[in-house]
């Protein structure tokens, strides 16, 4: 009997803690953005009256303190219908980032 009440009390406490944690919002800050991310790009660009198809991939790393570094490789292919030279590009990325402070509600 005592053991059953102890288990029931434990379940009630666990349920209350669960409900409380669901109501707590988590702040989204600059520290929330950290670590490496891969990305892909594709689309079209116009340069000197020529339309090019572009496709590429890259890696970008955020330090959680507002600084980023990375690299990207992409190819440009002219959409002229008569072929043309493909242009291969490689970029190094560096800079700073900020976030708009906001609160994200956890799923209920």
Image (spheres, grey):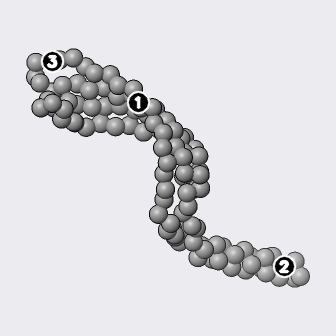
From mark 2 to mark 1, how far is it between C-alphas? 63 Å
C-alpha span from label 3 to label 1: 25 Å
Of residues 101 and 39, the one nearer the viewer is 101
Residue 91's label in the rendered image is 1
Q: Is residue 35 left or right of residue 58?
A: right
**Residue of label 2:** 6
Instruction: List the residue tagged with mark 3.
Output: 83
Q: Nearer the viewer, mark 3 or mark 1?
A: 1
In the image, residue 97 lies at what x, y percent?
48, 51
Q: Quadrant of the N terminus?
A: bottom right
Name the residue nearer the viewer: 33 or 96.
96
Query: Residue at (84%, 79%) from the top-left corner?
Result: 6
Q: Residue at x 49, y 56 (%)?
A: 98
Snapshot quadrant of residue 27: bottom right
In this image, 94 relative to 13: left or right? left
**Upstream in sequence: badge 3 or badge 2:** 2
Please name which of the two marks, 3 or 2, marks the residue nearer to the observer. Answer: 3
From what the image shows, is residue 5 above or below residue 54?
below
């Amino acid at each position: 009997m005592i053991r059953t009440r102890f288990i029931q009390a434990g379940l009630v406490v666990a349920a209350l803690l669960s409900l409380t944690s669901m109501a707590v919002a988590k702040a989204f800050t600059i520290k929330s953005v950290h670590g490496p991310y891969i990305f892909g790009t594709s689309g079209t660009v116009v340069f000197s009256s020529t339309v090019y198809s572009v496709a590429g991939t890259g890696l970008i790393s955020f330090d959680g303190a507002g600084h980023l570094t990375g690299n990207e490789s992409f190819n440009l292919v002219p959409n002229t219908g008569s072929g043309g030279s493909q242009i291969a590009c490689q970029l190094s990325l560096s800079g700073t980032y900020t976030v708009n402070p906001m609160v994200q509600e956890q799923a209920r």
